Image (cartoon, rainbow, N blue to C red):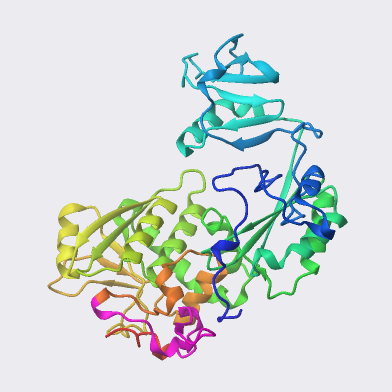
Amino acid sequence: MNPRRGSPDPTRLSGPPGALTTPASPRLQQRPGRTRGRAGRTEEHNRQDGEDVRHPHRRRRDPEGADGRHQLVLSVPPPLCLGRQGVSNNRDSRFDGGYCGGGAVLHYLRDESDVLVCKFPLVSLKNVYMFPGIPAYLERDFHYLEKLFYSPDTKFHVRDIFLSEDENNLTGKLNDLVSHSPAVTVGSYPEVNNRYYRTRVSLQSESESELLEAEEYLRSSFSDEVIVDFDINSISHAGRRIYDIIALRGEPHLSGPIASAVKILEECLDRYSTDEICISFNGGKDCTVILHLLHGVLLHRYPENTPSIQAVYITCSTPFDEVEVFIDQMVKRYNVTLWRIEGPIKKGLEELTKKEPKVKAILMGTRWTDPYSKTLQPFQMTDEGWPQFMRVSPILDWNYQTVWTFLRTLSVQYCTLYDHGYTSLGGIHNTIKNPHLKYSGEDKKEHHYPAYFLKDMALERAGRT
């Protein structure tokens, strides 16, 4: 991993704004003009061959539908001038089909009760469907027209490969893959702000064997540094991944720490019901670990009806905006019931006892290396004079590097401030970037490595003032 590598340049993104296509055919449309393609050919020549001039590996399907598959094109709402002539009812597919000039079809959306959902029709021409550009309408139309795109006799196999290289640097190798595996559709998708990878390469085929062979061919063309082991579904896979690591089916360096933390969480769930437990969550790296661990244990313990997680966020007077945004994101991602309570901590816990009297145990991300925490035990009541809760600390024996190894290995999302040199988060008034991560970039300006580059764990709180 190269810490000096910059973020992907958003100006390198290609394709028209707002274009939506199937994974089988990324970016159907091209910008107009007569720019030169490969081997001195004009863009018009290349377009006639169904090739993306800037990224030839992005093959575009014939709009006439030579392969008989549906094409999806994001569009503005269909023009009213098409009218409703020739409308016929098709109750089984829940839409009315009206035909207009040139072979285009108008699809009027109806629900299961045969009630017209929208007065504006969806337009299709052969196997090209023009959906509305407003996301809410797009999602609605898919729901009512899903039967149009379902084929029980067709099964697609898909593989995603995540790479640390910019998309523009991959064109040659992706073109080689297209030539080597003509039965596999290749798509590449740049990521601007992803902290794990820069480009996702999607492979799709009706033949699983040809897909696996193409994947092996592509992987062999890159070094191990370029290929990123990233789980795009890390939240839904949390239970399986965590218990696989405990069973020594991968990541042996994490097996011990995860096993000890899971044992404490399982004991907590044996002692208390889920509505008697909540997480103390303030958006920091340690409580993010606790959130992901608890989610994984609940998935494993209750696979059919997984209970939701409760959390309390005791706010400080000057929070970072990035922290607030991250907390909101995690609430949605993990389906968390969050209680926001004003601090300080003792006052916040007193308020929690009044607001949620059922809560008896609070999961903490405390570690023995934290201030005033060397004598803490995994299960320990709050001090005398404080609201009485059982403090449950599953990662007491973890260190700074273990925390980051867990987050990065299991593809867990974390607050963006950590990517900019912060190693311990408080409020704006008492937190700065860790000076031990500072370096001078090629632009001669001051930059900071991400938090997980810190080697001396004793310097974790060097950015707290």
Q: Considering depth in this image, is 92 or 400 the residue closer to the camera? A: 92
Percent coordinates x, y for residue 137 in the rendering: 48, 32
Q: Position of residue 145 (x, y in %)?
A: 58, 26
Front residue of this view, candidates 372 and 358: 372
Q: Residue at x 70, y 45 (%)?
A: 25
Q: Does any portion of residue 281 appear in the rendered image?
A: no
Task: Based on the picture, tell me whether residue 449 belongs to the magenta stretch.
Answer: yes
- Quadrant in the picture for residue 234: bottom right
Say if residue 442 shows up in the picture.
Answer: yes
Residue at image coords 63%, 42%:
21
**Image: magenta residue range:** 429-456
- The single residue placed furthest to the front in the displayed view is 34
Side (left or right) of 303 relative to 181: left
Q: Confirm whether the magenta stretch covers residue 9.
A: no
Tell me what residue is drawn at x 51 percent, y 37 percent: 133
Seen in the image, is 59 located left or right of residue 95? right
Please state which of residues 456 and 133 is positioned toward the viewer in this rendering: 133
6, 386: nearer the viewer: 6
Rendered location of residue 325, percent (x, y): 35, 60
- In the image, farthest residue toward the left: 385
| Residue that sits furthest to the right in the current view | 180
Quadrant of the frame with the C terminus: bottom left
